[in-house]
Amino acid sequence: ATVTFVSHDGEKYEAALIEGQSLMQVAVNEAVPGIDGDCGGEAACGTCHVIVNPEWSELVGRSGPVEEEMLCMNPERQQTSRLSCQMRAREEWDGLTVQLPEFQM
Ligand code: FES
């Protein structure tokens, strides 16, 4: 299964989706620029922000209350924004595409 990260300027980075890893880990493993994961996946830094393509948002789910606290401080926050460290990858997410917000370039 693969996931595609699309940077603000349209650059695409494909990464192998490993079930059970967080999407942040998947991105960091592939050195996707803009996903830093500074807090190590504690939902405390906001450097793993991704915007889920709307057609995927139902399957991957919406942000929870802890994520919201981080996300609501971000002016680039979109309706389908998530902290990728809080997204546990699943096999069914094969083909998932997420956008990276501009400030994370
Ligand atoms: Fe820090 Fe996700 S890695 S909030």
Image (cartoon, grey):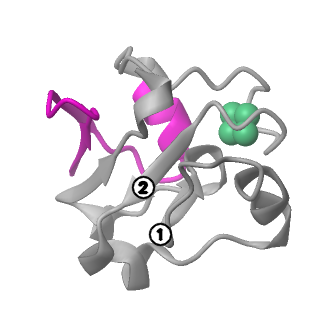
Q: Position of residue 14 (x, y in %)?
A: 18, 34
- Observer-nearest residue: 90 or 34? 34
- Magenta includes 16? yes
Look at mark 2 in the image and give the residue it sits on: 51
Q: Is residue 89 left or right of residue 37?
A: left
* Number of residues whose C-alpha sits closer than 10 Å to that of mark 2, classed few (under 14), some (14–19) or many (20 or more): many
Q: Of the numbered discs in the image, which one, if any, rests on residue 80? A: 1
Q: Position of residue 22 (x, y in %)?
A: 56, 45
Q: Is residue 92 above or below residue 18?
A: below
Residue type beneath disc 1: Thr
- Observer-nearest residue: 95 or 53? 53
Q: Quadrant of ligand 1?
A: top right
Q: Which residues are magenta?
A: 1-27
Q: Residue at x 48, y 26 (%)?
A: 104
- Magenta includes 31? no
Q: Residue at x 50, y 72 (%)?
A: 79
Q: Is residue 73 above or below residue 35?
A: below
Q: Residue at x 50, y 63 (%)?
A: 78
* Extreme-front residue of the structure: 75
Helix, strand or loop status at disc 2: strand
Residue type beneath disc 2: Ile
- Observer-nearest residue: 104 or 15? 104
* Circles 2 and 1 in contact, beta carbons < 8 Å: yes
Q: Give the Cα separation between the discs numbered 2 and 1.
A: 6 Å
Disc with the residue nearer the chain's start (2 vs 1) = 2
**Quarter-wise, where is residue 5 in the image?**
top left
**Quarter-wise, where is residue 64 in the image?**
bottom right
Q: Is mark 2 within 8 Å of ligand 1?
A: no
Q: Position of residue 36 (x, y in %)?
A: 58, 20
Q: Residue at x 47, y 69 (%)?
A: 80
